[in-house]
Amino acid sequence: MKLATTAKLPKKTLAKVNDPDNPAWSEDMLGAPVLKRGRGPQATPTKVLTSVRLDADILEFFKSKGTGYQSRINAALRLEVERNLTARPSLTTRKRVVS
C-alpha cells in the first residue's frame, strides 16, 4: 500500500523582516518623481499611416543621409506636388477656346 503524500504549505510571515543590509525604500532614497515628457497624442492628426513601395536604391539614398529619412521623402514629395500645382493651371481655371 502506498503512503499518501501531501504538499507542505509555505510558511506565513506576518511580520516584515527587518534586514539591515536591505532596508526598505524611503521617500528620500527615491528622490523627486520623474515625469516623462513627450509629445503625446496629437489633437488633430496631420499625417496618415500608409504603405508605399519604393525602389531599393531610392530608399537607400534617403537612409544614407541619416535619421529622418521619412521626413525627407515627405518633403521631396511635397516639393514635387507644389511644383506641379504652380506649373500647370487647373482644368477649372483654364479657358476653353471654341472655334
Image (spheres, rainbow, N blue to C red):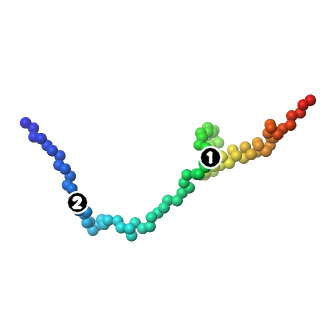
Report the Cα–Cα distance between label 1 and label 2: 56 Å
Say whether residue 64 is visible: no
Question: What is the number of callouts on the image?
Answer: 2
Q: Residue furthest left?
A: 1
Q: Earlier in the sequence, mark 1 or mark 2?
A: 2
Q: Residue furthest right?
A: 99
Find residue 96 and report its horizontal and vertical position in percent: 86, 34
For mark 2, give the secondary structure: loop
Which residue is at 27% across, 68% downward? 20
Quadrant in which the N terminus is drawn? top left
Quadrant in which the C terminus is drawn? top right
Within the image, what quadrant is residue 15 found in? bottom left
Within the image, what quadrant is residue 11 found in? bottom left
Report the side of 26 relative to 87 (left or right).
left
* Amino acid of disc 1: Lys
Which residue is at 52% across, 59% downward? 37
What residue would you read off at disc 1? 47
Camera-nearest label, 1 or 2: 2
What residue would you read off at disc 2? 14
Label 2 crowd bin: few (<14), some (14–19), many (20+), radius 10 Å:
few
Find residue 83 and report its horizontal and vertical position in percent: 76, 45
Find residue 29 and report its horizontal and vertical position in percent: 38, 68
Identify which residue, 76 or 49, lies in the foreground.
49
Identify which residue, 83 or 26, lies in the foreground.
26
Which residue is at 21% across, 56% downward? 12
Label 1 crowd bin: few (<14), some (14–19), many (20+), radius 10 Å:
few
Q: Are marks 1 and 2 in contact (CB under 8 Å)?
A: no
For mark 1, give the secondary structure: loop
Which residue is at 61% across, 49% downward? 44
